[in-house]
Amino acid sequence: MKKIKTTPKQEHDQNFLIDTRIIQDVIKAIETEISSKKSPHFNSTLEIGPGTGAITKELALLSKKVVAVEIDKSLSIALSSLPKSVTIEYGDALEYLKNLKQKIKQKIHNKKDGTEKSTSSLDSSSSFPFDLVFSSLPYKICEPTLKALSIMPGFNVGFFIVPLGFYKKIKESVYFESFFKTTHIFDIPKESFNPTPKSDSCLIKLTKKEFLKPQLSLAKKSNIKVHSTQACANFIIQKFLLQRTKKAKNALRDAIIDFSKLKGYDYSTKKQAELLILKLGLSSKILETNVYSLSQKELKTIKKRITKEPLISNH
């Protein structure tokens, strides 16, 4: 690929990874994911923010197809010499993910209605069309990007370069702990980037936690018990957290109702669910607070009480 001088833009929070040794270490980490597959390559990879394409060209060697979403059109010259298997989509990554989610949900709906024809093309897939997501994330879009992927139908695994401060935030977050298994791969010195950011970064792997509903379906078919207490608690917490504008008591009530309907328990009405909430012994302050305003300490309290509740632990 041609070496073209580019100037990182502060408005896009750009810090380009320039250390070739670190780039190769990132690729080696991603290659370990391929070893778990039957195919020697990924079918398709999504990269958010390719920058100058230094990692993109390496991803193209691991994947039959790479779609890279870049907000900065001034990088088009630097990206023009990438392999033909790479498609550059210019635009906002968050908008791209939002639109992709809508398309997937519509295709799933059409498939259920019988209006979606079976096809092998990516554009017509009714599931997440990428085996892998990679991104060296600017700090300001770390949280919204990962939250968008947490509710993306079919998303399974991704590797992300994030500031160390954000990684620590993930480890303390009830939200991310409920949706992802987070694996720290290695630290990356701040001097590996241009311009040099304020803090060091790290490479992490996020693996989406299984949803309870598919586990229950498998259990019924196989007549085995495959769902754990943690999976059951996660289901309720996930449902609870996604109702961020509701008061905690209402979001928790609706999450318990959904869980009870899945499991066939006797808490599938509002009154029954509210009685169970009383048994949790949560303070009125927590219950009357909107979900998005709850502190990490309060969220941890809720999750701890739910996990210990006999309805969950004796499933």
Image (cartoon, rainbow, N blue to C red):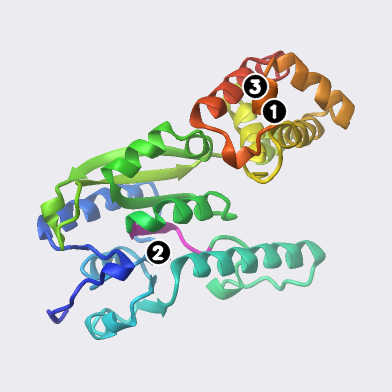
Residue located at (77% from left, 29% from top):
263
Q: Quadrant of the C terminus?
A: top right
Residue located at (40% from left, 58% from top):
141
- Front one among 180 and 36: 180
Q: Amino acid at mark 2?
A: Thr
Residue 234 in percent (x, y) is at 60, 32
Numbered disc in front, either 3 or 1: 1
Q: Which mark, residue 287?
A: 1
Q: Which mark, residue 63?
A: none
Q: Is residue 14 left or right of residue 87?
A: left
Residue 88: quarter of image = bottom left
Residue 10 in the image: above or below residue 206:
below
Query: Mark 2: few, some, or many residues within 10 Å (few <14, many ≥20)?
Result: many
How far apart are the two marked residues, 1 and 2, measured between alpha carbons? 42 Å
Q: Quadrant of the N terminus?
A: bottom left
Q: Which mark, residue 306?
A: 3
Residue 292 in percent (x, y) is at 59, 42
| Residue wearing tag 2 | 45
- Front one among 183 and 5: 5
Query: Mark 1: few, some, or many residues within 10 Å (few <14, many ≥20)?
Result: some
